[in-house]
Amino acid sequence: MTDSLTVRDNRTGQEYDVPILDGTIKAADLGKIKTAEDTPGLAVYDPGFVNTASCRSSVTYIDGEKGILEYRGYPIEQLAEKSSFLEVAYLLIHGALPTKAEYDAWVHEITYHTFVHENVKTFMQGFRYDAHPMGMLMASVGALSTFYPDARNISDADNRHMQIVRMIAKMPTLGAWSFRHAQGKPYVYPDNDLSYTANFLSMLFKMSESKYEADPRLVKALDVLFILHADHEQNCSTNAVRSVGSSQVDPYSAVAAGVGALYGPLHGGANEAVLRMLKRIGSKENIPAFIQGVKDGNERLMGFGHRVYKNFDPRATIIKKACDDVFEVTGVNPLLEIAKELEKIALEDEYFIKRKLYPNVDFYSGLIYEAFQFPPEMFTVLFAIGRTPGWLAQWLELVQDKEQKIARPKQIYTGDRTLDFVPASERWA
């Protein structure tokens, strides 16, 4: 057998041929390696799934060494420049770019379903005035499962399609309402005359005017940000969606799990940490001292490096261009000058080059969001809206994959064994 791995178990002297397929071996094949028939087989210990594939997927391709990101085979650079978010959403869900008729029908469906039940509004109004928008989004997405109990019928293709359309359509409404709630402003209903992203901006910022019209450059920049965040392979939140979805729960509950995972500062909150870092640096003159602090282990350089990308993040180049377009409208954020100087110094410093630290997508996205006048707690909400089609594409793939089982990792038990129970009357005597 040519595509195989020969493993010699030094405990028994026995050799095993383990098949290699697509650069992987099956964990179950390692389970056949054991010291005796009545003992457990070999398992893999891999905290954080650093080198473990949990599924086969045709949604997103990443080559971290070469800085490649593709959705269904299409380079992210081309999609960001030439496509729209809803077209990318169609591509992720359906696996191919739409015809004109398919795209028009898709946009019509999503536009038609942007409104939510009035009881959802009452539900969201029940949160405290200082509730975090991500907490509100997570709860309201999960609550949608109670409004659409038919969503549990995940084996029906038409039913799955309807829930996917509903969720993509309603996420901006829920996100905008969580934003308005935190500001104590009345909720704004969707304006279905507007595009997906323009409608979102209207629900966020409309006041007394009869119609809110956002600058087209801002609409385009936010649309590009949504595209850049639409999917990113098996990251923490996607893994959460797949793991919860493996129990065959409805898609709203599975996506709510994804929102919960994205809520964490190690996942969705990275761009907020970049802003805090830039504000703490304060001016370009303070950058050399900050850089030295990073080298000495006293400071953390946020927004640099990536667990997947080893040389550069392809999304960072695109988002840097979007920065220019946004600041043309809003005026330059003074933090941008600090960010550019910090990037310049870090990319020329051997310390960071050696460690393959370079700006990632979070380094500039926070600056754009702040230019839109979003508070930092809204950053992850924007991330979640963009990521929703990716989560749903991964969920759809999961429920149709006959190889998938309910997620149930092994563990290595490290606690006590076979203790004798002592009754409370004796322990407390």
Image: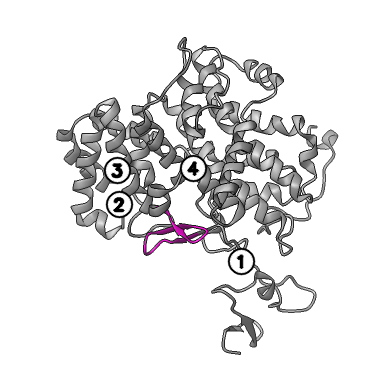
Name the mark on residue 225: none
Q: Which residue is mark 3?
A: 321
Secondary structure category for the residue under label 4: helix
In the displayed orientation, state which residue is furthest to the bottom.
1
Q: Over which residues does the magenta segment extend?
A: 61-76
Q: Pointer 3 and pointer 1: residues touching (CB < 8 Å)?
A: no
Q: CA distance from mark 1 to mark 2?
A: 32 Å
Q: Which residue is mark 4?
A: 85
Query: Residue 107, position in %: x, y?
Result: 57, 39
Q: Which residue is mark 1?
A: 44
Q: Mark 3 vs mark 1: which is more N-terminal?
A: 1
* Badge nearest the viewer, 4 or 3: 4
* Badge nearest the viewer, 2 or 4: 4
* Badge nearest the viewer, 4 or 1: 4
Instruction: Quadrant for residue 311, please give it.
Output: bottom left
Mark 3 Cα-neighbour bin, 10 Å: few <14, some 14–19, many ≥20: few
